[in-house]
Amino acid sequence: QKEVEQDPGPLSVPEGAIVSLNCTYSNSAFQYFMWYRQYSRKGPELLMYTYSSGNKEDGRFTAQVDKSSKYISLFIRDSQPSDSATYLCAMTLSGNTPLVFGKGTRLSVIA
Amino acid sequence: GAGVSQSPSNKVTEKGKDVELRCDPISGHTALYWYRQRLGQGLEFLIYFQGNSAPDKSGLPSDRFSAERTGESVSTLTIQRTQQEDSAVYLCASSRGQQGNTIYFGEGSWLTVV
């Protein structure tokens, strides 16, 4: 079993839809959880950062962490064509240790 | 600059040649990371620096790969005798190196070995 599992998609949704992206992980010691957005031929851009379990909201984006289930989610409300990108989940044991990434989910939002 | 800077942004090299990739982290960031991303794949950890020491080199795929860092500044990733399977984007990231600080990526160096 890989440390972090993420469905690669592709996921295609109509503009305005609510998007749900998910990752599962096997290492219960992970404490910091992140979502990165990566546009084609660009570096990953940090979207959301969460410590331990709980929810965090930032505009149209909500990140959820359920440590008991080893499951994290990213929700995008009112999705826009500009949200079309690959979304990578990442996690780490502490704030200054290397991140372990999922493979990324490719999202297309169709106008 | 404000962000992580990488050079070259694109490199095409012949199989068997050596290449050097450079990363200039965000000023004040003590931690520096190198990742590799093959086409359609996730990010693969290569090496991590805290200052100029490398506490974790576990991801370097072979002895053809090496990296160094000068102080808390520029890092160079060197690939010797490049092979076609080395074709990928090499991403550098940096962070303040303290508990809970986030990691920021550069735009990557896109390497093609022909």
Image (cartoon, coloured by chain):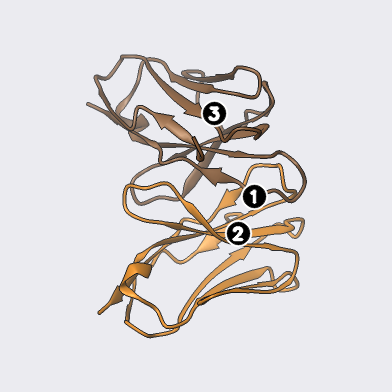
Chain colours: A orange, B brown
Judge depth for marks 2 and 3 and give the one in front: 2
The local secondary structure at tag 3 comes to loop
Does residue A10 appear anywhere in the picture?
A: no
- Find numbered disc 1 in the image and state the secondary structure of the residue it sits on: loop
Quarter of the image with the C terminus of chain B is: top left
- At mark 2, the secondary structure is strand
Distance in Å between CA atoms under marks 1 and 3: 23 Å
Q: Chain of mark 2?
A: A
Mark 3 = which residue? B60
Residue, disc 1: B102
In this rendering, the label closer to the viewer, 2 or 1: 1
- Quick one: label 1 or label 3, which is nearer the N terminus? 3
* Residue under numbered circle 2: A34
State which quadrant residue B28 falls in. top right
Give, as a three-letter code, the residue at label 3.
Answer: Leu
Q: Residues within 10 Å of mark 3 (few under 14, many from 20)?
A: some
Residue B32, x across and y down, in percent: 60, 33
Q: Chain of mark 3?
A: B
> Separation of disc 2 and disc 3 at Cα?
24 Å
